[in-house]
Amino acid sequence: MAKYETRFPGEFNELLKRLEVGITQGSVSANLEDKSDYSSDNVRCAVRVFERYSMIGGNRVSLAITLIGNGNDLFISLITSGGSKAVFFKINTVGEESFLQCAIDIVDEYYRSR
């Protein structure tokens, strides 16, 4: 499992759209498995779960994104899982790390463009 979390100013809908488009277009096998949205007053929460095939590991990896927005204040959590064929411990986490880096690059590019 690989994880990345950060907090920064931004526009909730714009970042969410960039993530959805960027991840699904970033890999021919990437797809949005499911999603959940919640809002209360000025707070919004979006959960997205993506999955893709890892050529290096020969298996599928998943990426869970939780985006929380309170006005212009955003918090994002990116967590990957899967990518190992071992029974009792993880080996070969390259696919997870690569999938995570794809999402980090989208977040970083969004932040730099503001």
Image: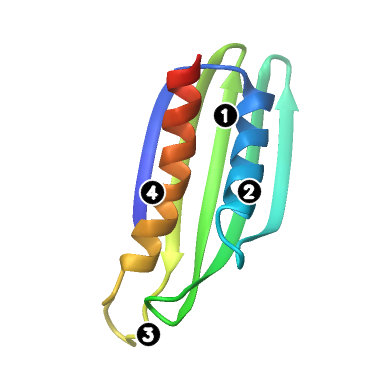
Badge 3 is on which residue? 85
Residue at horizontal 63%, vertical 52%?
A: 25
In this rendering, position of residue 16 left or right of residue 66? right
Badge 2 is on which residue? 48
Front of the two marks 4 and 2 = 4
Q: Earlier in the sequence, mark 1 or mark 4?
A: 1
Residue at horizontal 66%, vertical 25%?
A: 14
Badge 1 is on which residue? 68
Badge 4 is on which residue? 101
Crowdedness of circle 1 by 10 Å Cα count: few (<14), some, many (20+)?
A: many
Residue type at the position of mark 3: Lys
* Residue 106 image point, x, y percent: 49, 37
Q: Earlier in the sequence, mark 3 or mark 2?
A: 2
Front of the two marks 2 and 1 = 2
At numbered mark 4, what does the secondary structure look like: helix, strand or loop?
A: helix
Q: Looking at the rendering, in which quadrant would you find the N terminus?
A: bottom left
In this rendering, position of residue 88 left or right of residue 70? left
At numbered mark 2, what does the secondary structure look like: helix, strand or loop?
A: strand
At numbered mark 1, what does the secondary structure look like: helix, strand or loop?
A: strand
Residue type at the position of mark 4: Gln
Q: Nearer the viewer, residue 28 or 46?
A: 28
Residue type at the position of mark 2: Arg
Q: Earlier in the sequence, mark 1 or mark 3?
A: 1
